[in-house]
C-alpha cells in the first residue's frame, strides 16, 4: 500500500474579498474530490485574499497511480482560470 501527500500554495488573481475566495476554493475542492477521489483540505493562508494553501492525500496499492493523479491535479490547476500554482511539496511512501 502507498500513501501520497501533496501541499500546494496557489496565487489567486482578481479576488476582492475572502467570501469570494472561499466560494472559489469550495467549488475547486469539490470538483477535485469528485474527479480524483482524494482527500483535500485548506491548510493555510486562511486570511489571505491572494493565496490559498491546500493539502491533498491519497491511498492506493500502486505508487504510480498516486503519482499520475498528483500530476493530473497539478495540470488541472495550471489550466484553471484566475490562479497560478506557486509552490508544490509532494511525498509518496
Image (tube, rainbow, N blue to C red):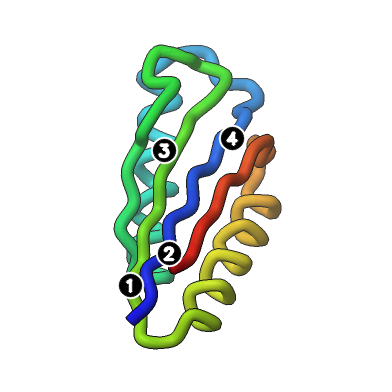
Tell me the residue that label 2 is attached to.
4
SS class, disc 2: strand
Q: Residue at x 49, y 29 (%)?
A: 52
The Cα atoms of the two marked residues, 2 and 3, are separated by: 21 Å
The Cα atoms of the two marked residues, 4 and 1, are separated by: 23 Å
Label 1 crowding class (10 Å Cα cut-off): few <14, some 14-19, many 20+? Answer: some
What percent of the width, then of the height, locates residue 88? 61, 45
Label 2 crowding class (10 Å Cα cut-off): few <14, some 14-19, many 20+? Answer: some
Q: Does residue 5 sit above or below 3 in this rendering?
A: above
Tell me the residue that label 3 is attached to.
25
Report if the CB atoms under discs 1 and 2 are less than 8 Å apart. Answer: yes
Please report whichever mark, 1 or 3, sits nearer to the chain's N-terminal start: 3
Q: Does residue 86 sit above or below 14 in this rendering?
A: below
SS class, disc 1: strand
Q: Quadrant of residue 55?
A: top left
Report if the CB atoms under discs 1 and 3 are less than 8 Å apart. Answer: no
Q: Does residue 3 sit above or below 39 in this rendering?
A: below
Tell me the residue that label 4 is attached to.
10
Q: Residue at x 54, y 65 (%)?
A: 70
Amino acid at each position: 500500500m502507498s500513501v501520497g501527500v501533496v501541499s500546494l500554495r496557489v496565487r489567486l488573481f482578481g479576488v476582492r474579498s475572502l467570501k469570494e475566495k472561499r466560494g472559489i476554493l469550495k467549488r475547486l475542492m469539490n470538483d477535485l474530490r469528485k474527479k480524483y477521489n482524494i482527500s483535500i483540505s485548506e491548510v493555510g493562508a486562511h486570511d489571505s485574499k491572494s493565496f490559498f494553501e491546500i493539502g491533498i492525500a491519497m491511498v492506493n496499492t500502486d505508487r504510480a497511480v498516486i503519482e499520475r493523479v498528483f500530476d493530473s491535479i497539478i495540470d488541472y490547476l495550471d489550466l484553471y482560470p484566475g490562479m497560478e500554482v506557486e509552490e508544490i511539496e509532494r511525498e509518496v511512501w
